[in-house]
Image: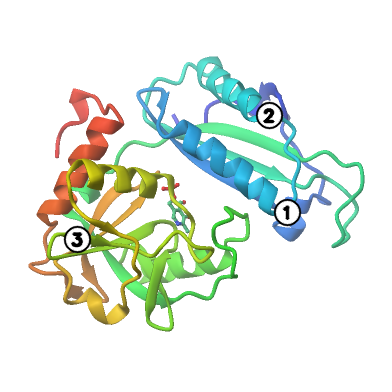
Amino acid sequence: MGIYPIVLSQNRFTHQDNLTYPFEERGLQFGDGIYEVIRIYDGQFYLFTEHVDRLFRSAEAIKLQLPFSKEELKDLLQDLLSQNNMEKDGIVYLQATRGSAPRDHVFPGGVIANAYAYVKDLPRNLANLENGVSAIIKDDIRWKKCYIKSLNLLPNVLAKQEAKENGCYEAILHEEGIVTECSSSNVYLIKNGHIYTHPATKRILHGCVRMAVERFAAELQVPFEEEAFKLTDILDADEIFLSSSTSEILPVVTVDGSPIADGKPGEFTRKLQEAYREDANISERQLTI
Ligand SMILES: Cc1ncc(COP(=O)(O)O)c(C=O)c1O
């Protein structure tokens, strides 16, 4: 199944066919909104609190009043899964915008935010997890507040499309040679048993899986250095990997056509993938890598 029939609209449930918006909607016209993608395994949310907390941080950063409290939203999202009898692997996509109002850059007065959420199947990509993926390098042309999970994804979309056109899975972004993150994931370099990644500043999205990677690294006693690495470090790396809610922890085996080390997923990345599977309670039937 693709998208499940029952969707959340504000704080009510309705059939997806009933969900319509006027053209003068601030998400549609200005990208004036925020979103979250939350992973589900066997019908259970993974890193649930982390995602809900980040949504509220993003809302505060753009001065958006959400139409529910954190606790209300958590209950609503759990109900969304049960109303759809969702018991598989998937995601919830949730979006909140500054509402429907005549087009004007200034915030509309007295308008309630538009929020909706839907559930979708998303099987784990076992081939990618097993074999790793390829990436290209692109200039990071985004705005200066990438920690906000904003709907304005045009630079990310263009970078990802170029990756695809080059037969790659991701685009690694850099600012003047300093690697920030990828178009839709965080990126890490491993050298001499240390993990390096860009610090959680305004220049990157503070990934929920990134937080989990930091925790796994501590458990595995692998130093986690929040220290940005350079483009010139990539080809000397022992391992490169990326992380996101949809991709999990994914080895990157070639960058711009050149292999990383022997061009195969490395041992530390494998350990982190294993830690992820345990943490997310991924069931036996999926232990195929
Ligand atoms: C730009 C960007 N960085 C990082 C991530 C990873 O975030 P998370 O681990 O919370 O899924 C995403 C996820 O979509 C993203 O779009």
Disc 2: which residue: 69
Disc 1: which residue: 28
Task: Look at label 2 and name its amino acid.
Answer: Ser
* Earlier sequence position, callout 3 versus callout 1: 1
Task: Look at label 3 and name its amino acid.
Answer: His
Residue at (55, 36) in percent of width and height = 52
Q: Where's the C terminus, which quadrant?
A: top left
Q: Which image quadrant for residue 184?
A: bottom left
Image coloring type: rainbow
Give the image location of residue 187, x and y in percent: 33, 61
* Earlier sequence position, callout 2 versus callout 3: 2
Give the image location of residue 84, x and y in percent: 52, 19
Query: Left or right of 184: which side holds 36?
Result: right
Q: How far apart are marks 3 and 1 (CA)?
A: 43 Å
Q: Residue 194 carries which label?
A: 3
Q: Is residue 57 above or below residue 193?
A: above
Foreground pick, 206 / 151: 206
SS category of the residue bearing label 1? helix
Query: Left or right of 246: which side holds 115?
Result: right
Front tag of 2 and 1: 2
Q: Do the residues labelled 2 and 3 touch (CB within 8 Å)?
A: no
The reply to whether residue 263 is visible in this rendering is yes
Q: Distance between the residues labelled 2 and 1?
A: 24 Å
Q: In this view, does 155 lie above or below 200?
A: below
SS category of the residue bearing label 2? loop
Task: Look at label 1 and name its amino acid.
Answer: Leu
